Amino acid sequence: MRRCATRILIIGGILWLACNLKTKQRQTSWVSPNPGSVELSDGTYTFHLNYTIFQAEFPHLQSYRCRELIQGDGICSGSLGQRLLLLAIKSHPAATARRATARRTWAQPRLLRDYRVQHVFLIGVSPNPRHMALLGQESEEFGDVVLWDFTESHHNLSLKERCFLHWMGEHCGQADFIFKGDDDEFVNPPVLVTYLHQTSNASPLIHGNIQRHSVVMRGGKYGISSVLFPQKKYPHFPSGGGFLMPRGSIPALATASERIPVFPLDDVYFGFLALAAGLQFQHDERFQVFGMKVELCLYREAMVVHGMSLDRVEVVWRGLYVEHRCNMSWPVLS
């Protein structure tokens, strides 16, 4: 019986993909970066990005044209007159349990003060038909998925950054702020909204845990060859675990993505886009990168805590907002 069920899921996944390729496929086009060298300076360092070398080492990153298999139409639609905070969460088709935990806790459509909070999961393709079948069922049930036709991989996360910017321009131009994060973390939307209210100059800035001129690693998962990038330091960039960006930054970032090569590390790539777009950063320690101690009430001030287990996310959310063990009281209207 289990083998039969597995076969049904695999066949279902193949059929689902075939149907959606016919009915939901859409291609977004833009001008590819011009061959040659792009030079960017932040006043301390000058960075040289040679498109020819990027094309030689990571050709698929430079040639890929964004194509949505699930467009995510309607994710940002809603009542007029309300501000919109979009939680844009990078996920993997196989991460069904992570998305389910997020939907039970922090990734729920709701009103917080004068902000409508909505989420979307940003996903690439898995070669496993079962994962794709389950993802298709999720999309039909919740309508909170955007799927592109590139394969999920470490380096392809940069494609997710680039394609998301163009998706925003076509499908979610009304979002006032966008929180970018991952599915393996605790996100605190009430604190995000409070932060936006308390930060008078929030709109011109990108907010996060800012990594300042990080040293380039030459080996391991995050290794970059000296041929591709000979400099020893990166420009400033927000930790990819979670950061906020305003609506006004999206057009400039999207334009920058049309003229510079796609860097194979997504958070560094975003730093280059922000530098090319002339955007500034605001650092805040409440965008936690490496996790926190076990004491529950420490989480009431955090905007995001990265790298948490699913059980821990459930415990923290329930303790703060269901059991109210830390005197967390927020005007959740619905």
Image (cartoon, rainbow, N blue to C red):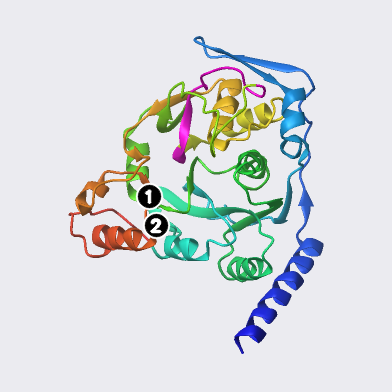
From what the image shows, is residue 186 above or below residue 128?
above
Q: Amino acid at mark 1?
A: Pro
On the picture, is 169 further left or further right than 80?
right
- Please report contact status of discs 2 and 1: CB closer than 8 Å, yes or no: yes
Q: Dividing the picture into quarters, in which one does residue 39 lie? A: top right
The residue carrying pointer 1 sits among few (fewer than 14), some (14 to 19) or many (20 or more) residues within 10 Å by Cα, namely many
Q: Position of residue 71 (x, y in %)?
A: 68, 55
Instruction: Say whether residue 230 is magenta.
Output: yes
On the picture, is 85 further left or further right than 50?
left
Pick the residue in front: 34 or 29: 34
Q: Quadrant of the C terminus?
A: bottom left
Q: What stretch of residues is rendered in magenta? A: 227-243
Q: Which residue is mark 2?
A: 106
Q: Amino acid at mark 2?
A: Trp
Name the outermost residue toward the front.
Answer: 219
Q: Which residue is mark 1?
A: 189
CA distance for labels 2 and 1: 7 Å
